[in-house]
Image: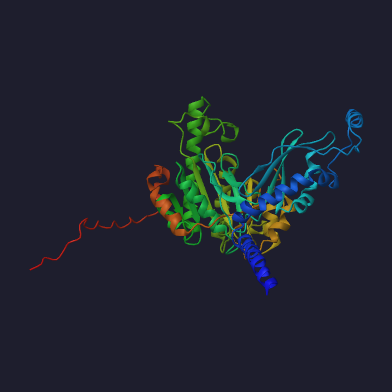
Amino acid sequence: MTGLTTLLEVGGPLAAIGGGAAYTRAKHPAAYWSTIGLPISTTRLLSSYGSIMEACGLTVAPSRLRILAVKATTRREVRPVPPRRGIIRPTTTGLRIRLRLAPGQEPADVAASAERLRHAWGVHAVYVTTLKPGVVELRLVGYDVLRRVRMPRKLPSALLKVPVALREDATPFVRDYRVVPHQLTLGATLSGKSMYLRHLVAGLARQSVALVGIVCKRGVELSPFAARLSALATDPDQAADLLPALIDEMEDRYDLIKSRQGIAFNTSDEEITSDIWGLPENERPVPIVLFVDEVAELFLVATRKDEERRDEMVTQLIRLAQLGRAAGIYLEVCGQRFGAELGKGATMLRAQLTGRVCHRVNDEASAKMALGDIAPEAVGTACAIAPERPGLAVAGDTSGGWSRIRTPYLSLGDAAEICRDSAHLVPDLPALKRFQPYAPAQPVKAPGPNVQPRPATN
């Protein structure tokens, strides 16, 4: 009986602690990492750094001077030299550590051993970033940050910069239109593409930017944000009228740049290398972001008349993609499917879209169309996205880099409220005035009495 009592007294608390740790790790991974995972991983790293580096082939032979110094002072064995380790910096999602590479090493050697280091130190992932020649940073991520997305507290904020998702290395994915002016975003139904678009609209709504939308499915994606839109086309016929207006606006802005910088008016737009950001702030036109959802609808035709209209719209989109950046006009092209079979101009339009975001798609050809020309190794990752993880996507650009990202949840009502609160930021653009959607005013509730009436007593 005494042994059973002792077992209960000792085993009961241990079982409770173990069960609580397992529950916390499954349901609250961030809390588990901060309390348990961080100390364990730090201890592993400090106690086994040299041996793990040697096992991963990340050591070099010591110099002759080092060999002579060790033999002169001690009798211990001279071991290979690992990269010199910097200070370990803990974060809410993992660890950061800088390494100064030994002579003869390169960052690719460390990147090739990232998977081995992940298993050796018991973390979810290890990412390698080159800071300067001879110095790399290891970012250790303690748990799967894309399972339940929590954006960092400190996010970059500037004009035309929108933190829209979280990368798999726990850093924010920022859509910067000044760096990547045009982007192609693909995703099947319920893949999270609409959530991504919702975050972009909500983030830009708070800035001094004109938002223009073309949604060829009766405008259902952008109609809730009508209070903040400067123009909206809900079918191909309206799009055929809106795109020439944007072309005229772009040409007017080029004329403004010419007049302000002393360029002759007979100079073609293609020969102008400057942009609106070189103009004084009081003369600078407001940037315009054009959202094109279901872009395939602009390419589909049923009659010869529709084919002529299609060719005109595609030509205008290509012109905006080629020349719009300097005039402060940026494109966000979205769709479920985008391929060369859409017709003439599809491949040319894609070539102008620097950024690429591919959510879950229904066929490999769509993933190849989005990522195959810039990051072929990312196509397989995009095709492996599970339907149970909406919002998960692969983001790449023409530099060849790519990473997995996931957009946090944002309800349609919250995004619409942000747009209604920012309705006063809608700029005055006479060329787009006739395309501005109708936004019904919100009913104002009459304030109730401050003092509750009391019934008179006899």
Which of the 4 image quadrants contains residue 448?
A: bottom left
Front-most of residues 397 and 431? 397
The x, y position of residue 435, in whole percent, is: 42, 51
Left or right of 272, for residue 375: right
* Image position, residue 189 (x, y; %): 58, 64
- Pick out the residue farthest to the front: 2
Residue nearest the observer in this picture, 19 or 352: 19
- Quarter of the rendering occupied by the C terminus: bottom left
Depth check: give the residue in front, 182 or 300.
Answer: 182
Residue 440 in view: yes
Q: Residue at x 48, y 42 (%)?
A: 248
Q: Residue at x 64, y 67 (%)?
A: 9
Percent position (x, y) of residue 183?
A: 60, 48
Residue extending furthest top? 262
Asked whether, in this view, residue 96 is left or right of residue 286, the answer is right
Q: Residue at x 67, y 61 (%)?
A: 385
Q: Position of residue 325 (x, y in %)?
A: 56, 39
Q: Is 7 above or below relative to 247?
A: below
- For the rendered model, the colour scheme is rainbow
